[in-house]
Amino acid sequence: MKVTFYGTRGSMPVAHPDYVQFGGNTSCILIAFRTGRIAILDAGTGIWKLGNDLLKNSHEQYDNINIILSHTHWDHIQGFPFFKLGYDPRRNFTISICGKERTAKDLESIFASQMQNDFFPVALDKMGASFTFLQPDITTYIHPSGIKIIASKHSHSGDAYGYRIEEGGKTLVYCTDVEHKDGIDPKVVELSRNADLLIHDAQYTSDELKIKKGWGHSSWEQAIEVAEQAGVKKLALFHHDPEHNDTFLSNMEMECQKRFPDAFFAREDTEMNV
Ligand SMILES: [Zn+2]
Ligand SMILES: [Zn+2]
């Protein structure tokens, strides 16, 4: 699989010269599978450029593109109204949150709400593409092409889900907006077991976390703890706090690498093979 980071920021987008190295757009990742098919993780503001790049490259997946969401907090869905492929009547999308123990929420109405005319000029049902909203009560799904997805719920305000995606013997784990309450959550470690790449929430430093308990996020030290316990090969620290500029994140990255050399802070507009 090839992974491209289109949005690495958490909470809100930032546009400022001090934020160009790691990027200012909120959560959005493109996965390109070996089959040439794609899937998208979260629809933060990064999905604007992701859509533009797919158009520029004349990407021709018309039958179905999966947009898989960790959860529906604003920073994970707010780019969707600006996703140009959503305005193409030839396109079909499945927008889903997978996993069990869901607190009942209707995904389609959440997407429709952020586009009601108090907030946005175009309604969801007037965009043009065809959308299927799914909230399957499953933890494991195997696509006929051999791609396996495992979903696992973790602690976050309003809940969120992490995903383990396996293809051709390689494993990517996406686990953002996670708060480890009493020690490291063993379910997150299990989901991340032996992953080739773990993308994990690292919004705070340990000191910041002390005063932001209950805000739903992790420190970079906790992300490393998960990576160490799970035997992860590479760790991408993700969901950067809007208060953390390039200098701050670069310094934090150097600290991280002293403890886990294969850790890095995810940079917008970079791609890597898993
Ligand atoms: Zn978030
Ligand atoms: Zn959140």
Image (tube, rainbow, N blue to C red):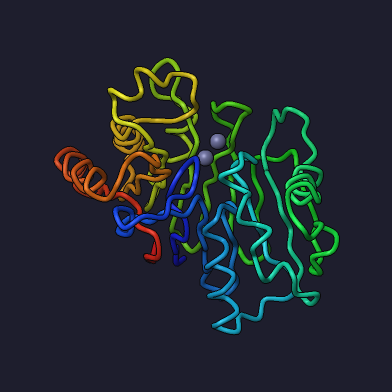
Q: Nearer the viewer, residue 142 or 50?
A: 50
Q: Position of residue 236 (x, y in %)?
A: 35, 49
**Residue at the outermost top position:** 182
Give left or right: position of 127 versus 181.
right
User: Which residue is rendered at x = 58% and y = 36% of the image?
Assistant: 152
On-image quarter of the C terminus: bottom left
Q: Nearer the viewer, residue 198 or 75?
A: 75
11 vs 18: above or below: above
Q: Which residue occupies 35% across, 45% down?
A: 237
Quadrant of residue 38 in the image? bottom right
Name which quarter of the figure residue 16 lies in.
bottom left
Measured as percent of width and height from the top left, residue 14 is found at 43, 50
Q: Residue furthest right?
A: 125
Q: Is residue 52 above or below residue 46?
A: below
Looking at the picture, does residue 160 appear above or below residue 78? above
**Residue 142 screen position, x and y as percent:** 65, 54
* x 72%, y 76%: residue: 62
Tally of numbered tags: 0
> In the displayed image of the protein, which residue is found farthest to the left?
258
Residue 149, position as x, y percentages in the image: 59, 50
In this rendering, position of residue 157 left or right of residue 224: right
